[in-house]
Amino acid sequence: MEFPQIDPVAIQIGPLAIRWYALAYIAGIVLGWRLMRRLVVADPKVATAEQVDDFVTWATLGIILGGRLGYVLFYRPGHYLFHPLEALMVWQGGMSFHGGLLGVVIATVLFCRQQKISTLGFGDRVAVVAPIGLFFGRLANFINGELWGRASDVPWAMVFPGDRLQLPRHPSQLYQAGMEGLILFILMLALWSVRSNRSKPGLLLGAMAAGYGVARIIGEFFREPDANLGFLFAGATMGQLLSLPMVLIGAFLIWRSRRPS
């Protein structure tokens, strides 16, 4: 299939360029915020809608700072060791989901302590809306023609403009948008709809962590490894190695939440 030529710049007003990638972040944050305002006040209530409004700033900083720092430390530490100022140039691209996740976790813990609300209960609500941002982020990766898949002869394989080898490849960004975004979101909503699940602090958070970890590990089998890293331990990619602890932590949270109190 021919790769759809979509301009990465969504809106150009003179020297001001607004990229699809930025709009993806905005869409994920805004939609997640609006949905979470409803989730926190549903029975059992864990916070107020106004507290969610305040949390948006914390979460946004956690996503951006954590995502950038994670990319610097996990994917290109050698490069940024010798070019430290480039780590601040976020407009050049380079964000890590795992780093962003850690940033949001830290932001959530600090926010909940300040507001004196249940960290796990509030975190469960964050977990339900998180796949929204993942979905839009992966679509933006596809539009940018980045993070493409491994070479393949499937009928829907695409040649990405930035690929110097010009090989037909899996559109793995779309696979990941489906698994990490759409399917995981449907799963989280299904779990949320059962009231008893909402009453077990940490259950939904664990389900999201484990679900994302599994989806990411599967998706990495179709995605081309980062050129500067390649395959690592036992042929695994960095994304898979970082996702394995998420599966284990998620399973622990699920087990912990279901123990008799």
Image (spheres, grey):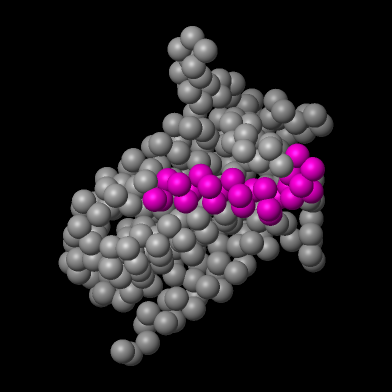
- Residue at (58% x, 31% y) in the render: 91
Counting from the top left corner in percent of width and height, residue 232 is at 79, 59
Instruction: Give left or right: position of 163 versus 39.
Output: right
* Magenta portion: prevailing SS class: helix
**Which quadrant would the C terminus be assigned to in this image?**
bottom left
- Residue at (55% x, 67% y) in the render: 246
Q: Is residue 243 magenta?
A: no
Whether residue 85 is situated above or below residue 32 in the rendered picture: above
Instruction: Give left or right: position of 45 versus 121.
Output: left
- Residue at (51% x, 37% y) in the render: 139
Q: Is residue 67 magenta?
A: yes
Q: Nearer the viewer, residue 106 or 36?
A: 106
Whether residue 181 is situated above or below residue 3 in the rendered picture: below
**Which quadrant would the N terminus be assigned to in this image?**
top right
Instruction: Give left or right: position of 101 versus 236.
Output: left
Counting from the top left corner in percent of width and height, residue 162 is at 72, 28
Counting from the top left corner in percent of width and height, residue 127 is at 39, 59
Q: Is residue 209 visible?
A: yes
Whether residue 216 is situated above or below residue 143 in the rendered picture: below
Counting from the top left corner in percent of width and height, residue 161 is at 70, 25
The region drawn magenta spans 58-83
How many badges with numbers are in the image? Answer: 0
Instruction: Give left or right: position of 87 versus 256.
Output: right
Q: Is residue 38 visible?
A: no
- Residue at (66% x, 41% y) in the render: 87
Of all residues, the one furthest to the bottom in this rendering is 260
Q: Nearer the viewer, residue 238 or 50?
A: 50
